[in-house]
Amino acid sequence: MQSPSSTGNEGWAKALADRRVLVALTGGIACYKIATLVSKLVQSGGDVRVIMTNSATKFVAPLTFQSLSGKSVRTSMWESDDRPDSQHVGDARWAEIMIIAPATADILAKLAAGICEDVVSLTACALPRKTPVLIAPSMNAQMWENPITQRNINSLRELAGYHFVGPDSGWQACRTEGAGRMSEPEEILTAAGELLEL
């Protein structure tokens, strides 16, 4: 297997080495691509934790990400361990960057409205203001073009200072083509590396 530096991605590999990266998955078919993202993060020397909504676990099992990251995967806001702080608060304080990918229309709506009813939205809400959040949207073209979705994206950019990568245009799981396809892992990694170098 090639190392990240041998694939021409020296920039993001160096930027993400020894950084604490929280990867958050929500329920979209593009969850399978996040296995590659987590693997590349770990290979670059990043310290990676993964959290998943219940919907995300329907697409890829948490065990996949536990194996790749070497750490247990949090899937519920009710999970606890022996740390004194709440799990979502502990993860939020720990992270140097949070990557939400795939980010569904549902999670965008929750984040924009401040609704915290799953482990991903709850942890995002608890992040310190200085911690960058990178969102990789993934949804059907009509959902992406929906004015409510666009309003939520604008709110997250303007009010919360969240950053976005993609989406791309192309073939979608609904058997149509259009905007809404999640960016490839390498694009997400490059965007994350750039944010951490700011």
Image (cartoon, rainbow, N blue to C red):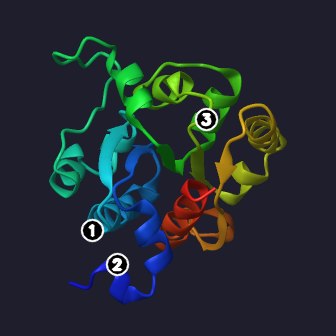
Label 2 is placed on what type of residue? Answer: Pro
Residue 36 appears anywhere in the view: yes
* Relative to 183, residue 110 above or below: above
The residue carrying mark 2 is 4
Label 1 is placed on what type of residue? Answer: Gln
Counting from the top left corner in percent of width and height, residue 61 is at 23, 47
Question: Within 10 angstroms of label 2, few (less than 14), some, or many (20 or more) residues?
Answer: some
Counting from the top left corner in percent of width and height, residue 172 is at 57, 67
Taking 146 as reference, is 197 left or right? left
* Relative to 37, residue 20 above or below: above
Number of the front mark, 1 or 3: 3
Mark 2 and mark 1 residues within 8 Å of each other at the beta carbon: yes
Counting from the top left corner in percent of width and height, residue 35 is at 31, 61
Taking 102 as reference, is 71 left or right? left
The residue carrying mark 1 is 43
Give me the C-alpha separation between circle 1 and circle 3: 26 Å
Please tell me which residue lies in front, 84 or 156.
Answer: 84
Location of the C terminus by quadrant is bottom right
Label 3 is placed on what type of residue? Answer: Lys
Helix, strand or loop under label 2: helix
Question: Within 10 angstroms of label 1, few (less than 14), some, or many (20 or more) residues?
Answer: some
Residue drawn at (66%, 32%) of the image: 109
Give me the C-alpha separation between circle 2 and circle 1: 7 Å
